[in-house]
Image (spheres, helix red, strand yellow):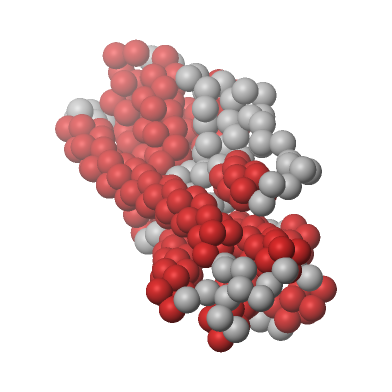
Amino acid sequence: MHIAQNIRLSRILKNTWQVDLLMIFSSTAAYLLHDRLIKYHLEIPTLVPTVLGTAIAFFIGFNNNQAYDRWWEGRKIWGALVNDSRSWARNIICYVQLNNLSEQKKLAIHGRMVTRHIGFLYALKAALRGADDPTYKNYLSEGEVMEVSKHSNVHNAILLLQSHELNELLEKGHIDGYRYLQLDALLVKLTDSMGMAERIKNTVFPTTYNYFTKVFIWLFVVSVALVLSQPMGIWAIFMSWLIGFVFISTQINGMTLLNPFTNNSASLPLNQITRTIEINLLQMLKEVNIPEPVKPVNDEYIL
């Protein structure tokens, strides 16, 4: 996620240079075609780029609105995960009663169920980013790692482990029925957030919108070059590229938000969010070895 007030020109050009070359080539070809052939036979009306520009504005506006909605929904989902994670740790620490448990066993249960939740978050983050990240294994026992490895959905398997242990605590009388329902409701909320995030990742944005927007921008650049060739001469190449650059950079900016969970500068800072939850939960357990917060890259963006 970008945190700087300004975006470097080099980053913009890095994302658009291929399309820029195509637009410059198309503008040059259109100018030469007009200069060598078309100007002797007909005059291209200005209505053509005007209509195309209006259509492109509608397409880009729709694309970017939908892309931002996906990005913002993803942010709300992870905001809910932050709150529910803190609630889970607090309730585990406060709700598990002593009864016939020694203090050491009580702390072991707290540590196991809270750190297992950290493993759940790292497994979910890796799945959403399509990465092979074994960090979640650091927060599970060897037996638990073997158990969740049997599942295609590791983070869901971790929630299953949590539910099993929560049920054991109820059966052994270490937690009463009311508090059991409170903790089970949190597991349901975590499952809901997990499912909503998976829905965003697995739902492909209609490719026709992106495809036709690119085609319309290309036609628009060519038509602008044809219309401006007469009054501006060779400068029509630069002007048509410049106008096209505004449209294409806006369109590309929106498309980078379509999958908010990818590991790039425009996506959600899942590393930072997960690390923040990890720090909070470990501090609640009064752990000593607390990891450092994730730092921004070049004070420009954070992952």
Observer-nearest residue: 21 or 86? 86
Observer-nearest residue: 70 or 97? 97
| Residue 102 visible from this viewpoint | yes
Residue drawn where x is 57% and y is 68% of the image: 97
Position of 163 compared to 61: left or right? right
Position of 9 compared to 70: left or right? right
Against 205, is 35 above or below? above
Residue drawn where x is 52% and y is 27% of the image: 3
Residue drawn where x is 29% and y is 14% of the image: 231
Observer-nearest residue: 31 or 165? 165
| Residue 152 visible from this viewpoint | no
Locate residue 212, reporting x and y percent.
35, 52
Location of residue 122 (image quadrant): bottom right
Locate residue 239, reporting x and y percent.
39, 19
Locate residue 118, reporting x and y percent.
64, 58
Observer-nearest residue: 162 or 23? 162
Locate residue 2, reporting x and y percent.
52, 31
Location of residue 40 (image quadrant): top left
